[in-house]
Every structure is written in structure tokens, then in C-alpha cells.
Amino acid sequence: MNPSTSGSAMDDGIKDRTSVGFTTNTFPLQQLDGAEDDPFLKPFAKVTRLWQRSDGYLPLKSDISFQDFGGWHDRMIISDLRADGNIRFRLVGTTAEAIFGNLIKAGGSFADLPNTLFPHYASYFARIAGGDMFGECIGLVPFEGREFLPLRVLDLPVLETPTDGANGGVRDGAVRPTLLYSFFRSTK
């Protein structure tokens, strides 16, 4: 299955496209299993392997070491993922910060960002927050004055604790992710 190019039955059927050509889509975590063969996911293979270890379930933050992201630290953002689709940035890599014109800062939220050309951000992040989904984005940076930069983003959900969410544990489907790990690369 190629999540980047197919509109298959596994696809949740929701795709957003902004006026600057920034396209987003969400897919079940199980589709990460084919990352090495997928044109969009292949450059992120080192990262997707960490999620594949969870057998299609949400990984726990404690199962992933920050050192596992060697080579990605400057191009990643870790955020609190809220059910309403707003995210609050916890950690922002220096390259990721520069991509967005130094507007994204630790402690800030997406809803408070000026000059965004990504009006569907809340529905996109809410789909990821709703359960076992990951997100991908491709196009030009959706910020005024930055829309000349080509970009690919992989958004992966994480559980902070084994009992995140309303009722229950990690593997019983009653949890929702509370963290979002986002990885950025240029499409040049």
C-alpha cells in the first residue's frame, strides 16, 4: 500500500489542500509497515521503524529514546496534541524553526501563529489526535512569506503514558495520542 499516492479503502478519505498547494492526508499507522517501499515515507524510514516496533499501535514515549532520532533533531518538533486539533509546541529544532520564519517557538501554539496559510490545521491534527493515524504533508510552507520553500512533513502520534485518554490502557483502543512528533525535510 502506498499512502502517498493512493486513495484506497485504507485511506480515511480526507485530504486538505491549501491555496499554496500544501496538501495533507492521514493514514492508519499500519501503513507505516511499507515505509521502505513508499516514495514519501522512504526518506523517513529511520523514524518510521521506531513506530513499526509497536505493531500498528501507538508507541509510548518511554519506548522511544531521543537518541533514536539522530540526524533529525534539528528538523523535528515535539508538540502536545489536543483533541481539538490545536497543538502546543514543546521542543522545536533549529532548522524546523527557520523553515517557519522563526515563528514557531517552544511554548507557543499553532492557533496563535500569524500569517498561516493552513486553514485546515485543526481538522488535520484532530484526525491524528483521534487515534491510530499518522499524517503526511507535502507542498510549499503554508506561511505568508515562506511559501517559496518546498517541504515534506511526517506527523507521528505518541502516548505520553500508558493510560493517556479516557478509559484504559495502551493496546485496548481506549486511548488517544497526547504527543505529536513532526519531522521535516526539503523536497529539493
Image (cartoon, helix red, strand yellow):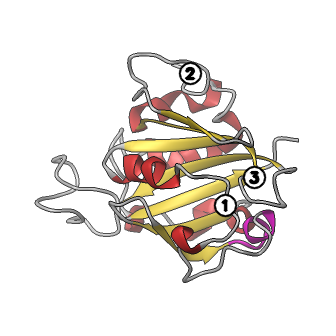
Q: Which residue lies furthest to the bottom in this view?
A: 107
60 vs 49, left or right, is: left
- Residue plotted at (50% across, 69% down): 79
Q: Distance between the residues labelled 1 and 2?
A: 29 Å
Residue 102 lies, with reference to residue 42, above or below; the image says below
**SS for tag 3?**
loop
Circles 1 and 3, Cβ within 8 Å, touching? The answer is no
Q: Callout 2, which amino acid?
A: Asn
- Residue plotted at (32% across, 60% down): 83
Which residue is identified by label 3? Answer: 141
The image quadrant where one finds the C terminus is top right
Q: Distance between the residues labelled 3 and 2?
A: 23 Å
Does the magenta run of residues contain 178?
no
Predominant SS along the magenta part: helix
Of badges 3 and 2, nearer the viewer stands 3
Q: Which mark is residue 116?
A: 1
Magenta range: 93-99
127 vs 181, left or right, is: left
Question: Residue 53, percent across and down?
Answer: 42, 45
**SS for tag 2?**
loop
